[in-house]
Structure formats: structure tokens, C-alpha cells
Image: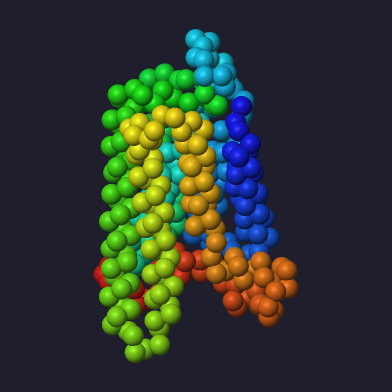
Amino acid sequence: MASLPLYIISAIITLITIFLIIIYSVNRNFRSYPFFFNIIITLSIAIDNIIRLIPASNGNGIESEDKSALCQIQAFTLTLFDKLMLTLMTVFSAISYLGIFHQQFYKKNEKLLFIILPIFSLIICIVCSLLFFGQGITNGGEYCYVVTNNDVKKLVDSIVTGFLFIINLICIIRILSRIIVLRNENQDMGREDSYNHHLIRFISGLIINLITFIYVLLLINKLLPHDLGFVKDLIYILISLMVELFFTINHELINYIKKIFHCGDDIDDNDNLVPNNDLSDTINNESLNESD
């Protein structure tokens, strides 16, 4: 059985996801590809944590040869959704990069990018999960999972995760350097606040990527203290919550929530709530475009 803190954090993640889906469904101003991508990544994180709470394992630290069908399903799907969070984070970074440095290509292929790249990331996760599942599963912990101390799992998982990490770093660092250059070049044009907004956004993304990928790589290679117990899972779920908040909290959502609760001035649905989340906002900023 999962511990109480895991239930609480997983419940928070699930409630945020449900709230987000409701808002995106009832307000047409949020219906854009970047916003729907937010739903995909937050929904995958919520499903991952819900699956983690299913009591399919022994939960007593004792392995048994008899692995139930539910245990096997939990082991496979948890592995799948754990990897999916990382691949979708990479998709976000890659699309952000294309939108800034190859804007015309992005505009012509926006729909395809938001369809093909998530599907491709899902395929990668399925292939990896099948490979890891074939190495065996364990049912002695709080939940069923693939065997993590297998050399094949460690090697392949480290290579895939490291590759995704490098892609994220390259894309985000290039974006940050571009924003800094443009901010310095346009300091006298009254647009510094806009550049600072993007700068803060992608610095936050860089920090979240560093924390997430480094922690996952430490987990994969068993480099964390063995006596941490469920604390390792707690830290991972807290990181998942941090990732979800990064993709959900933006200016448009805050404005809409203020409108719901009548905080501040009235906001016109067709004006201030135009669906420009931070990703699409950056992409639509012509001055950030470098080349096509």
C-alpha cells in the first residue's frame, strides 16, 4: 500500500488535472494546440500517479513468484508513464526551439508537430517499457514495477534518459541565449518586460529539467542512499507535481481564475484571454525568430 503523503500529493495532481480539463473544455479561448499539449502532459502525470496507488503488490518487502495480472499491468504502465513525462518534456523543448528559430516551419506544420511528436514519444516509451518488462518485474514494494537493478535496464534507460536530457539542455540553453541577446539589443524599445517574462519562463524550465533528469538518472543507476525508502518515491512525485505546475500555471490561466472569482477588473473573453500560453506567446513573437 502507498503511504499517506503519496495519496495526498497524487490527489492534488489529479485535482489540478481535472480542473485544467474543465477550464479548457468550457472556455473556447483555451482551445489551441499548445494548450491541448498541456492537457496531455498533465493527464499523463495524473494517470501515472493514480496507477501508482493501486494496491497490486505485496507491500511487505517480500518478493513472490506469483505475479498477478493486475501487478503486471501496473508494472508496465508505471514504467510507460514515467518515461512519457520525460519524453513529453523533451517535445515541449523541441517545439519551443522550432517555434523560435524556425518560425515559418513551425507555422506551416504546427498541427503535425503537436500530433506526430507526442505519438513518436509514446512509441519510444512503449518500446522501452516492453524491453524493461521483459527483464522481469518486482512485487515486494509499495507497487509493482519492472526490475530496476538489471544491467540491461540500467544501460538502456540511462542512454535514453541521457539523450532526452541533452536535447532539453541544448534547446533551452539556445532559447535562453537568444532571448538574452534580443533583450540587450532592444533595451531602449520598451520591450524589456516581455523579454524578461520569457527569460524567467525558460530559466524555470531549465531548472526543472535539471532537477527532474538528474534525479531520474540517480534513480536509474541506484546512486541514492538505500535507506531512503518511500522518500525516494515521495521526492519523485513532488517533482512530478512541480512539472505539472510548470505546464499549467501561466498568465492566461491566472486571469481566467481571477475572472471566475471576480478578482480584479473584468476580463473580456475575446481580448485578454486569447490562448497565448508561454509557448505560443514566444512562437508568435516575431522578434525572437532567427532563421527559417
Would you identify the image quadrant in which residue 87 lies?
Answer: top left
Would you identify the image quadrant in which residue 254 lies?
Answer: bottom right
The residue furthest front is: 227
Residue 14, position as x, y percentages in the image: 62, 46
Judging from the image, the colouring scheme is: rainbow
Quarter of the image for the C terminus: give it.
bottom left
Point 29% across, 42% down: residue: 162
Point 48% across, 51% down: residue: 243
* Camera-nearest residue between 121 and 184: 184
In the rendered structure, the answer to whether residue 78 lies left or right of residue 21 reads: left
The residue furthest top is: 65
In the rendered structure, the answer to whether residue 144 lies left or right of residue 263 reads: left
Would you identify the image quadrant in which residue 143 lies?
Answer: top right
Quarter of the image for the N terminus: give it.
top right
Residue 212, position as x, y percentages in the image: 41, 47
Point 44% across, 30% down: residue: 227
* Camera-nearest residue between 12 and 252: 12
Residue 206, position as x, y percentages in the image: 37, 58
Point 64% across, 42% down: residue: 8
* Camera-nearest residue between 188 and 9: 9
The residue furthest bottom is: 188
The mark tally for this picture is 0
* 201 relative to 239, above or below: below
Is residue 102 visible to us here? Answer: no
In the rendered structure, the answer to whether residue 289 lies left or right of residue 54 reads: left
Residue 138, position as x, y percentages in the image: 47, 20
